Amino acid sequence: MKKIKITNIILLIFFLSNSLFSQRNLTRDTKEWRKYRFEVIFGAGFSSYDGDVGGGIDDALEHLSVGNWQASLVMPAVQVGFRYKIYRWMAVSTNFAFTYIKGDDSKSNDRRKFIRNLSFRTPITELSTQIEFSIIKEKFSSMSKVNRFRTFEFRNINTYLFIGIGGFMFNPQAKLRNKDTNDLELFELQKMGTEGQGIGNNPSLYSLIGISMPLGIGFKGIISERFSVGIDFGYRFTSTDYLDDASNMYFDNVLISETYGENAARLADRHLNEDGLPSATKYPRKTLIRGDPDNNDSYMFLTFSVIYRLRNDRTGWLF
């Protein structure tokens, strides 16, 4: 009887010790991640565009496809942001990003786009807020002292999905050769009413401010107590179809010229003839489609980041 009691006592002590040790590690881990809730993000990478102008071999009216992606559309991008961890598995971030996106029918393998001969570039200035949901959480309890320096053991990569909302500004532009000097000049397309905006009963000039919805995936790996590196890919659905200034039908070229000037008419209809030379005849009103009004334009970011964690304890923020 005594042997059984002694055995039970030993087992009880073992399980209690193990439970207390696990709880201690959990408490330590909980305290640790809370000390590093706030992060500053510095990123650089690439952007690309998905819309009506340029792209690979694809239907000119259906641009939301992999076949329409083209390497020549890739542009550099920069980003800064701030992240706050609400829970270990959820965070919210605010990001400011800047890039240019572009498209060019002359570089497309689609013959219809090549003949249409439109091109554009536009700056994108975006401010967005995103919610991140971790699939694989960071391990904050794996800190150890090595050579008097506090380091993190590299055990896993924080993997998260994100969704958000943002606002952005854009201003599509295109180059046109001056007939007198033969120099290329840059024009702001929104002011040109290239699809008859502001003429007669047509809608007014489109807004240069849009709403974006970021959606994507990110990865983050801890390299030291304060620093992490990350990579994320985010696709931006937008509220506008005019990132590229092409959305609907060709409009009467004569009326565009009378309202906005000769350069506006030249920018509105740049199509080539079958020989690949500028066509002398212009499309009549509402007979051929210039863009796709059923699909809004989109853009995307691939960003590589360096992340700095701010430590928060009883004495305040430690930079």
Image: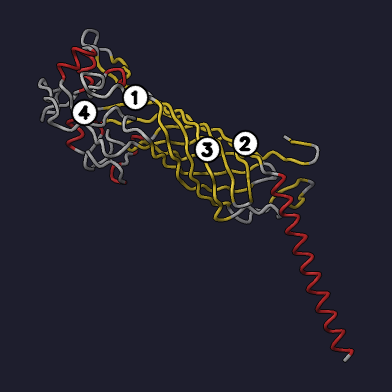
Q: Quadrant of residue 229?
A: top right
Q: Element under label 4?
A: loop
Residue type for callout 1: Pro
* Location of residue 274 with respect to 133 vertically, above or below: above
Considering the image in quadrants, where does the N terminus appear?
bottom right
Q: Position of residue 6 (x, y in %)?
A: 87, 84
Q: Nearer the viewer, mark 3 or mark 2?
A: 3
Q: How many marks?
A: 4
**Residue sticking out furthest to the top:** 180
Residue type for callout 4: Asn
* Location of residue 170 with respect to 143 vertically, above or below: above
For disc 2, the neighbor class at 10 Å (few under 14, some 14 to 19, many from 20) is some
Mark 2 or 1, nearer chain start: 2
Residue pointed to by mark 1? 172
For disc 3, the neighbor class at 10 Å (few under 14, some 14 to 19, many from 20) is many
Q: Position of residue 62 (x, y in %)?
A: 25, 42
Mark 4 or 3, nearer chain start: 4
Quote the CA–CA distance across marks 3 and 2.
Answer: 14 Å
Residue pointed to by mark 3? 129
Mark 3 or 2, nearer chain start: 2
User: Residue drawn at (14%, 16%), measured in percent from left and top?
Assistant: 254
Q: Are marks 4 and 1 in contact (CB under 8 Å)?
A: no
Disc ID at residue 137: none
Quote the CA–CA distance across marks 4 and 3.
Answer: 37 Å
User: Residue drawn at (27%, 12%), measured in percent from left and top?
Assistant: 183
Residue pointed to by mark 2? 40
